[in-house]
Image (cartoon, helix red, strand yellow):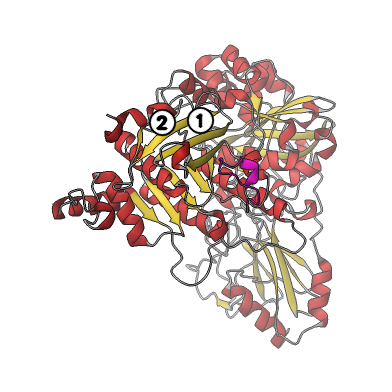
């Protein structure tokens, strides 16, 4: 019952009206103990000839004024009372304690107007967070402790779930402890019947409405779809049943507004149809459930509360606190037997969010998903009923029969990559066979593939870093690649000199090594500086600290994203900080480090050259070392995609001292090369590496 506001109202003439909600009251007033109390209409939300049901929700969507009742009444003039009769405060004489006043003030500050709510009882209010949704449901259950010292609240609306608690004063410990022990509010579910709700068979107007949506009378009859009258309005009533018994009812009006019976058990719509089923279909609305039946699928249920706006980024809550999806746990025994669950939710963002939330709770491993057909070149059909209406039951069956496995992070099928595999076959990705190094003698042995790791080793002074610099220059000249350089053995100025000499093909200085050849001009130098700036990006630690691999890779990632680099050079391994836990061996550390580098390379399609020195060779006789000679671990050869040894002849009696041997000792991908040796000539003046038949002295 909606009483008049708690203030004195003096009625002095026949023109006064009493405001009980956003509508005026209609019935004559009755005087009881000097208090004028309006007699309420027997109507419930414009629904005639039905007993008034007191509940905490709106049985019909209206536009409420916050803090007022959702019940609506028509205005009625109140006959003039006996002279001098006034409406007295019904709680006059009951003084509020300081605790209750403080509690009211705190609750009002967060939008909870407790009004006449008293201590020791539960009260249904409009939630200030969700405002009851479209149906303006009074879904907030508020409990005030018996002593009035504290309060807890929970919103039972599925899309909200707001809950909390507060105390009147900080030193109230006993009451607050009692409040915490209250825990979850135990809901008492109403017992309802078709008669108590005033449900009727569907009229011809609604039957026609469903017919336009391709839903037959037989489907409506089998699913016990009914109607209910609200004054001059008729609404659709979807009956929720469990084991044949009516447990809840959801209504839909002509404006597509939905509301449900309050204080009833939340379950799937059509729950009895999936009892004992191994395959079930879950849709987002009752109309979609009916549409599925028209396509021949009775093993289908609909969620009762629609879809969330977005996917939650929080961890899955415990079952007793999973308020938004309580219907899942209420139907747990029906779902446990299902081995295949097809999630046919709407194709919009909320629908996809609902599918993800359901999959999180039901287990992705037994979930499947559908893709709705295209409506145009841009849009797709939204749901099952749309497909039924425009394409027919056959098309809807094809959609369900073509359902695909719900994706599980880290678990894939080859067909998930068919687009990439097709592009690989037709060579439309670019660099599928690798990029040429620029040296003909190496073309059959080693080509540079994006996303791979190449380990380069060799004894000191064999030219490892010089060869890599020359390779980078060749790649830039041929395909325009850019690079990130983490070269810790080189000063920046020296490294710039070496790169410029290879690029311009002239010495940086005209003294000593370059005095016999013309030095690069000032203009060439300036143009070379611009080339350096456009092509290379430096990863350097400017203080005394040694960089670790995580730091290097984080900056390399930034270089890929910001500058579009295609390659990363880490030179050398022993200049990195290799601190590791005392329980971790060097072999385990190297394995973990190389795994990180390979993941970076693959994820960013960036080729990585990693220079690693061999351990001290006690019995070295001048030949090239082996990859297993690298200091640290055999994982260097085990985990790399390509392994190269750079070796320079130091004995003039054994051959030209300017000849460099490139030993390709491992190639994982046979498409890009094979094991073998190539020989290049090194020009000490310009730092260039050339095929032997191209060297000027050999011409």
Give the Cα distance between marks 1 and 2: 18 Å
Start-end of magenta stretch: 617-629
Q: With respect to residue 193, does 580 lie above or below?
A: below
- Viewer-side residue, 77 vs 150: 150
Question: Which residue is found at the position 44% from the left and 39% from the top?
Answer: 660
Q: Which residue is mark 1?
A: 677
Prevailing secondary structure class for the magenta stretch in the rendered image = loop
Q: Which residue is mark 2?
A: 435
Q: Give the quarter of the figure containing the N terminus.
A: bottom right
Q: Secondary structure at mark 1?
A: strand
Q: Nearer the viewer, mark 1 or mark 2?
A: 1
- How far from the left and from the top, in percent, is residue 434? 45, 29
- How far from the left and from the top, in percent, is residue 13? 50, 72
Q: With respect to residue 579, does 250 lie above or below?
A: above
Question: Is residue 304 visible from the viewing direction of this image?
Answer: no
Question: Which residue is found at the position 51% from the left and 76% from the top?
Answer: 12
- Viewer-side residue, 533 vs 92: 533
- Tell me which corner region of the image, top left, top right, bottom left or bottom right, holds residue 375: top left
Question: Is residue 352 visible from the viewing direction of this image?
Answer: yes
Q: Is residue 508 magenta?
A: no
Question: Which residue is found at the position 59% from the left and 12% from the top?
Answer: 394
Q: Please count the marks in the image.
A: 2
Q: Within 10 angstroms of label 2, few (less than 14), some, or many (20 or more) residues? A: some
Q: Is residue 618 magenta?
A: yes
- How far from the left and from the top, in percent, is residue 74? 54, 53
The answer to whether residue 287 is left or right of residue 606 is right
The answer to whether residue 652 is left or right of residue 356 is left
Question: Which residue is found at the position 70% from the left and 55% from the top?
Answer: 586
- Tell me which corner region of the image, top left, top right, bottom left or bottom right, holds residue 107: bottom right
- Tell me which corner region of the image, top left, top right, bottom left or bottom right, holds residue 526: bottom left
Q: Earlier in the sequence, mark 1 or mark 2?
A: 2
- Viewer-side residue, 234 vs 40: 234
């Amino acid at each position: 019952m909606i009483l008049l506001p708690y203030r004195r109202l003096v009625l002095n003439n026949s023109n006064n009206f009493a405001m009980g909600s956003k509508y005026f009251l209609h019935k004559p007033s009755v005087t009881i103990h000097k208090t004028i109390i309006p007699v309420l209409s027997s109507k419930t939300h414009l629904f005639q000839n039905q007993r008034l049901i007191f509940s905490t929700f709106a049985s019909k969507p209206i536009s409420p004024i916050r803090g007022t009742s959702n019940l609506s009444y028509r205005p009625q003039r109140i006959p003039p009372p006996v002279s001098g009769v006034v409406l007295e405060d019904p709680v006059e004489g009951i003084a509020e304690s300081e605790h209750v006043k403080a509690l009211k003030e705190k609750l009002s500050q967060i939008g909870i107007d407790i009004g006449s709510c008293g201590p020791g009882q539960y009260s249904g209010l409009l939630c200030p967070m969700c405002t009851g949704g479209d149906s303006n449901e009074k879904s907030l259950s508020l409990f005030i402790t018996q002593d009035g010292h504290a309060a807890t609240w929970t919103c039972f609306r599925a899309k909200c779930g707001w809950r909390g608690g507060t105390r009147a004063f900080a030193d109230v410990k006993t009451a607050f402890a009692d409040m915490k022990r209250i825990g979850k509010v135990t809901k008492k579910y109403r017992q309802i019947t078709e008669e108590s709700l005033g449900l009727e068979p569907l009229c011809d107007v609604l039957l026609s409405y469903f017919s336009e949506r391709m839903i037959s009378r037989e489907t409506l009859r089998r699913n016990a779809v009914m109607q209910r009258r609200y004054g001059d309005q008729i609404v659709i009533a979807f009956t929720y049943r469990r084991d044949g018994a009516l447990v809840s009812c959801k209504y839909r009006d002509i404006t597509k507004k939905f509301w449900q019976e309050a204080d009833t058990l939340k379950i799937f719509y059509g729950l009895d149809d999936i009892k004992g089923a191994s395959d079930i279909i879950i849709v987002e609305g009752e109309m979609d459930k009916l549409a599925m039946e028209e396509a021949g699928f009775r093993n289908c249920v609909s969620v009762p509360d629609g879809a969330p706006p977005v996917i939650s980024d929080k961890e899955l809550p415990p079952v007793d606190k999973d308020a938004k999806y309580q219907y899942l746990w209420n139907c747990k025994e029906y779902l446990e037997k299902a081995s295949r669950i097809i999630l046919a939710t709407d194709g919009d963002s909320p629908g996809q969010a609902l599918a993800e939330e359901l999959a999180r709770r039901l287990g992705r491993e037994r979930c499947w998903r559908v893709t709705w057909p295209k409506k145009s070149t841009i849009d797709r059909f939204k749901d099952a009923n749309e497909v039924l209406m425009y394409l027919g039951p056959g098309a809807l069956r094809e959609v369900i029969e073509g359902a695909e496995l719900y994706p599980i992070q880290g678990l894939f099928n080859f067909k998930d990559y068919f687009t990439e595999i097709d592009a690989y076959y037709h060579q439309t990705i670019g660099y599928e066979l690798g990029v040429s190094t620029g040296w003909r003698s190496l073309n059959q042995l080693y080509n540079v593939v994006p996303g791979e790791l190449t380990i380069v080793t060799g004894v000191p002074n064999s030219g490892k870093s010089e060869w890599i610099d020359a390779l980078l220059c060749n790649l830039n000249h041929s395909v325009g690649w850019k690079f990130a350089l983490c070269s810790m053995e080189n000063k920046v100025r020296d490294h710039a000199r070496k790169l410029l000499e290879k690029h311009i093909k002239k010495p940086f200085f005209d003294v000593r090594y370059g005095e016999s050849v013309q030095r690069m001009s000032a203009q060439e130098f300036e143009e070379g500086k611009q080339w350096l700036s456009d092509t290379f990006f430096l990863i350097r630690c400017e203080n005394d600290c040694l960089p670790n691999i995580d730091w290097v890779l984080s900056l390399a990632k930034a270089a890929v994203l910001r500058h579009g680099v295609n390659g990363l050079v880490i030179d050398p391994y022993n200049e990195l900080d290799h601190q590791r836990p005392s329980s971790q061996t060097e072999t385990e550390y190297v394995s973990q480090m190389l795994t990180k580098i390979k993941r970076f390379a693959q994820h960013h399609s960036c080729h990585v050259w990693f220079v690693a020195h061999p351990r001290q060779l006690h019995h070295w006789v001048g030949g090239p070392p082996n990859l297993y000679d690298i200091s640290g671990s055999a994982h260097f050869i085990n985990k790399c995609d390509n392994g190269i040894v750079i070796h320079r002849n130091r004995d003039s009696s054994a051959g030209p001292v300017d000849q460099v041997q490139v030993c390709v000792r491992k190639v994982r991908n046979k498409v890009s090369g094979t094991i073998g040796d190539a020989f290049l000539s090194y020009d000490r003046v310009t730092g260039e590496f050339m095929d032997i038949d191209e060297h000027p002295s050999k011409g």
